[in-house]
Image (cartoon, helix red, strand yellow):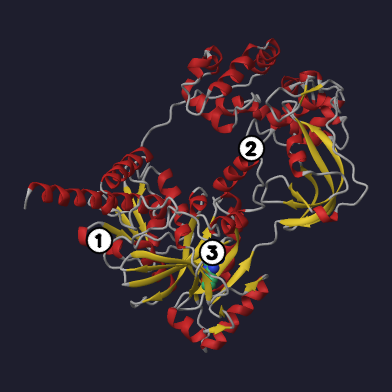
């Protein structure tokens, strides 16, 4: 072999090594949610590969991780004929519907045994089929009418979490993974923010954003959109798929294709409902929108027996969450004054039930939002209520606008104290300039001080604070501890007993913690987490008060803006006077300790595999709280492998390495020990 050939071969090997490394990193990042290296290292490898490929363009292959940038526009999408039809799902809307579904399935199966279901969130995006031949992504197509879809391969190749090449070597020669392309909320919000800054039209919701992005003829545009993918089934596959739906999904995940981390196996309709309610509660903390749950009979044999009706499987059904959006009419707009004087326009609405709760107010955030959404009094609007979040106006229904609407105008004077309303150049928020002269600001400050996560003063609700301030009994938070039982007992709906209880609660609240107290003071931008970090960093109030901006910024999460707010708070004579009175009233806290210490599973490394009966993320969080590390791959360094249902190669590897294997019950025992 001459010198040149040898170096050519070495370069080919180097390129292939880099590609393998990048694929492995992608798999850990997107599928296992366990990055192996920091982003900077990934970028370094990526650029190394890219520059080698630039030097040797003849070595570029379509499955290289660099080949995701999009290509010149198409004039139209080619049609794709699905080898196995892509199904849609029937819906059910109530618990009775679910019981009926279960009973129907059992009747058809001729068995009264409880059924196992694979359960997973229903994503609201665009269904696609990914076809891999010899491990390489060769085609991606939309569902279309279920038989014929559109070839969106170029666009799908730009989605980073979709592998261009499968990992490992035990994938079938042909496998089609089916799933949903969606836009996670962070990306959706960031994209819309940028669109607005550029004066472009934002997307109405993440579903439209995903569909609009995937159906671009110019894949270079798709490449700029933050899309993601979770598989929920298979199409054509030239291997024995195994015996359960969950087992198939675990194998797909092992080949490097992302599968929802929420996927579980449960037994019986009752357990399906528990899962439904659990996810509905957690719906707003997920990184993406879901609109319900999908229940699938887990046994593939039972699926075959149950079969299909029209284009929907009889073995799967979607259970939709209640709608979070409804239509109503804006009857008036009022302006509320917050703790920091911020003026918020609030729409008074014709009352309407949204997701089971009657809504009659919705925040309009600020005047920029009012203008952008072009909201007028009298308009019919779409309102959205998501979880505990304050309901908001999504958009106006333009063609329902009556002729006699009126504009929403920011007042020039504070509706509560009459001071000027000012808006600093470059800020979206307008503020009442009354400061502590404004009773609204004082009331909000006291409500915040008393709230659960601050001083947690039981029984001191919003109404009572308003009465106390309106009656002139207190002026500020320090006044709370000067109250006498007779002052309070005379108030509306207050007897001697509740007055006594409030006194007790006030007394009790004096013993608190430094972080709660800091949070309770209501320093601008100092939320709960920042207050905790400050307490940990400085340990005493005196040390925080003595710190300058530079020193404050050594605290995690404290930047120049927060530091400036803190310094300015402790410079104001009024605040120092209030602080003095609070400390004189006996507010105290135990000495702050730096957290470290040993926790029971400190330093132990866990790998979770297979389907568990609670979300993997929950187990992971619990383990981490006990000091354990949770990683994605099994090695000699792994202490425990937790094997759920249909665990595959990781379990085998654990056994071959002699790593301790736990079942779910044993894990639960460790967690509660
Ligand atoms: C969605 N949209 O999340 C299915 N889906 O299964 C899930 N859709 C499906 N499964 C069979 N999780 C046909 C459609």
Which residue corresponds to the image point at 49% horizontal and 63% vertical from the top-left? 152
Q: Nearer the viewer, residue 483 or 249?
A: 249
Q: Earlier in the sequence, mark 3 or mark 2?
A: 3
- Extreme front residue here? 75
Q: Earlier in the sequence, mark 1 or mark 3?
A: 3
Viewer can see residue 639: no
Q: Are marks 2 and 1 in contact (CB under 8 Å)?
A: no
Q: Nearer the viewer, mark 1 or mark 3?
A: 3
Q: Nearer the viewer, residue 272 or 49?
A: 49
Establish if 201 lies above or below 530.
below
Q: Is residue 351 left or right of residue 321?
A: right
State the mark number for residue 76.
Answer: 3
Q: Which residue is mark 2?
A: 197
Q: How many marks?
A: 3
Residue 653's tag is 1
**Helix, strand or loop at mark 1:** helix
On screen, residue 173 above or below 218: below
């Amino acid at each position: 072999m001459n010198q040149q050939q040898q170096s050519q071969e070495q370069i080919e090997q180097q390129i292939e090594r880099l590609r393998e490394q990048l694929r492995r990193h992608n798999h850990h990042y997107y599928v296992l949610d366990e990055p192996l290296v920091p982003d900077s290292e990934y970028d370094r490898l990526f650029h190394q590969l890219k520059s080698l490929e630039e030097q040797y363009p003849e070595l570029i292959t379509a499955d290289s991780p660099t080949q995701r940038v999009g290509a010149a526009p198409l004039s139209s999408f080619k049609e794709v004929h699905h080898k196995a039809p892509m199904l849609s799902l029937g819906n059910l809307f109530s618990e009775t519907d679910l019981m009926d579904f279960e009973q129907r399935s059992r009747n058809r199966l001729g068995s009264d045994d409880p059924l196992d279901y694979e359960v997973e969130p229903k994503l609201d995006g665009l269904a696609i089929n990914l076809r891999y031949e010899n491990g390489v992504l060769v085609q991606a197509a939309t569902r279309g009418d279920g038989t014929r879809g559109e070839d969106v391969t170029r666009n799908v190749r730009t989605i980073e979490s979709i592998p261009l090449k499968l990992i490992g070597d035990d994938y079938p020669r042909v496998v089609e993974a089916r799933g949903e392309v969606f836009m996670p909320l962070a990306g959706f919000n960031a994209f819309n923010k940028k669109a607005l800054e550029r004066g472009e039209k934002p997307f109405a919701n993440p579903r439209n954003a995903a569909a609009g992005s995937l159906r671009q003829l110019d894949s270079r545009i798709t490449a700029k959109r933050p899309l993601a993918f979770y598989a929920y089934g298979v199409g054509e596959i030239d291997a024995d798929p195994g015996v359960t739906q969950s087992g198939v999904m675990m194998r797909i995940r092992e080949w490097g294709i992302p599968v929802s981390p929420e996927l579980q196996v449960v037994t019986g309709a009752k357990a399906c409902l528990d899962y439904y309610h659990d996810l509905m509660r957690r719906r707003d903390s997920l990184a993406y929108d879901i609109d319900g749950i999908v229940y699938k009979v887990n046994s593939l044999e039972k699926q075959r027996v149950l079969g299909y009706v029209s284009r929907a499987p009889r073995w799967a059904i979607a259970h939709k969450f209640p709608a979070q959006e409804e239509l109503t009419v804006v009857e008036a707009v009022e302006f509320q004054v917050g703790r920091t004087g911020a003026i918020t326009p609030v729409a008074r609405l014709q009352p309407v039930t949204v997701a089971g709760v009657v809504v009659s107010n919705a925040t309009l955030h600020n005047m920029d939002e009012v203008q952008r959404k072009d909201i007028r009094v009298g308009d019919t609007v779409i309102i959205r209520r998501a979880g505990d979040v304050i309901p908001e106006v999504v958009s106006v229904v333009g063609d329902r606008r009556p002729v006699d609407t009126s504009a929403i105008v920011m007042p020039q004077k504070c509706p509560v104290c009459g001071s000027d309303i000012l808006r600093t150049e470059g800020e979206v928020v307008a503020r009442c300039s009354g400061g502590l002269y404004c009773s609204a600001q004082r009331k909000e400050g006291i409500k915040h001080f008393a709230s659960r996560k601050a001083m947690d003063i039981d029984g001191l609700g919003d109404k009572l604070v308003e009465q106390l301030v309106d009656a002139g009994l207190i002026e500020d938070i320090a006044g709370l501890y000067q109250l006498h039982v007779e002052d309070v007992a005379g108030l509306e709906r207050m007897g001697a007993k509740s007055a006594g209880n409030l006194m007790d609660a006030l007394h009790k609240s004096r013993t608190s913690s430094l972080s709660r107290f800091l949070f309770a003071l209501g320093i601008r931008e100092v939320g709960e987490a920042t207050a905790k970090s400050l307490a940990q960093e400085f340990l005493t109030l005196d040390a925080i008060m003595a710190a300058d901006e530079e020193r404050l910024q050594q605290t995690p999460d404290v930047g120049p803006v927060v530091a400036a707010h803190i310094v300015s708070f402790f410079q104001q004579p009024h605040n120092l006077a209030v602080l003095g009175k609070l400390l004189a009233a006996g507010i105290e806290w135990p000495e702050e300790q730096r957290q470290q210490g040993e926790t029971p599973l400190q330093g132990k490394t866990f790998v979770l595999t297979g389907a568990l009966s609670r979300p993997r993320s929950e187990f992971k969080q619990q383990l981490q709280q006990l000091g354990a590390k949770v990683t994605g791959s099994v090695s000699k360094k792994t202490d425990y492998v937790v094997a759920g249902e249909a665990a595959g190669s990781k379990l085998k590897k654990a056994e071959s390495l002699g790593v301790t294997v736990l079942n779910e019950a044993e894990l639960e025992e460790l967690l509660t020990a």
